[in-house]
Image: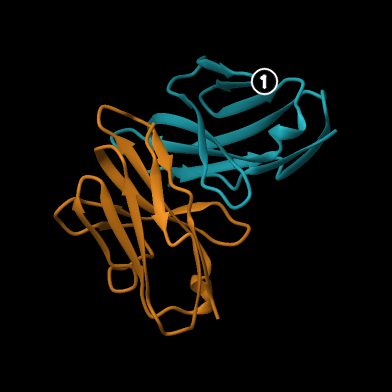
Amino acid sequence: EDQVTQSPEALRLQEGESSSLNCSYTVSGLRGLFWYRQDPGKGPEFLFTLYSAGEEKEKERLKATLTKKESFLHITAPKPEDSATYLCAVSQAGAQKLVFGQGTRLTINP
Amino acid sequence: SAVISQKPSRDICQRGTSLTIQCQVDSQVTMMFWYRQQPGQSLTLIATANQGSEATYESGFVIDKFPISRPNLTFSTLTVSNMSPEDSSIYLCSIILVMGDTQYFGPGTRLTVL
């Protein structure tokens, strides 16, 4: 059964303090690994898709990387507006269904 | 991406009643899905809404409890039937655009059952 585990559950940083979020996954043939951001009371907002080990994608202060067993979301010099829950999800080859991790709740203090 | 709207945005309902949630997209999509997000939890797929045919349900979800319709490419409904307090959740629709590969989510419907 496909499984996604995110760590830490919660992370509190000072503004400008860089860090990384982890997403470990088990899937029978990875089609894609997806990162989303979710603000309170809103639906998840798409950030990145990674398809193969070694792939990296960047958007502003965020960079996502992928290995055969895990993905990292690196946050460089974060700002308070980066505070949100970050969700990782995987889909299996030949399927569109997403299996989500529990998320990491990130708080950036000014 | 596309503009995805859900109605209602929130509701408070009595146990034993039913609520129908609508999802409307401003672009043609290939696939539509319904997810549930229980308080403090992540998202769990309820079913894939198939145009013109019965939805495909995930393990643990049944049509009698969560009937789904998708009459055309841009619209779907999810009904939560015979509600109990355990059904209190956020219900989200998601879509995959034609020629796309990414799921985009609607704003969600926050349901509270008393």
Q: Residue at x 33, y 62 (%)?
A: B78
Q: Residue at x 28, y 34 (%)?
A: A94
Whole-percent x, y for residue B26 in the image: 31, 40
Whole-percent x, y for residue B100 in the image: 31, 28
In this picture, residue A40 sits left or right of residue B5: right
Q: Nearer the viewer, residue A110 or B80?
A: A110
Q: Residue at x 63, y 50 (%)?
A: A40
In this picture, residue A79 sits left or right of residue B68: right
| Secondary element type, mark 1 | loop
Figure quadrant of residue A97? top left
> Does residue A27 show up?
no
Q: Residue at x 52, y 64 (%)?
A: B89
When the figure is inspected, residue A69 is found, relative to residue B96, above or below; the finding is above
In this picture, residue B29 sits left or right of residue A100: left
When the figure is inspected, residue B65 is found, relative to residue B108, above or below; the finding is below
Chain appearing in cyan on the rendered image = A
Residue for badge 1: A61
Q: Colour of chain B?
A: orange
Indicate how the structure is coloured in the image: by chain
Q: Nearer the viewer, residue B36 or B9?
A: B9
> Does residue A46 show up?
yes
Q: Amino acid at mark 1?
A: Arg
Whole-percent x, y for residue B81 in the image: 36, 76
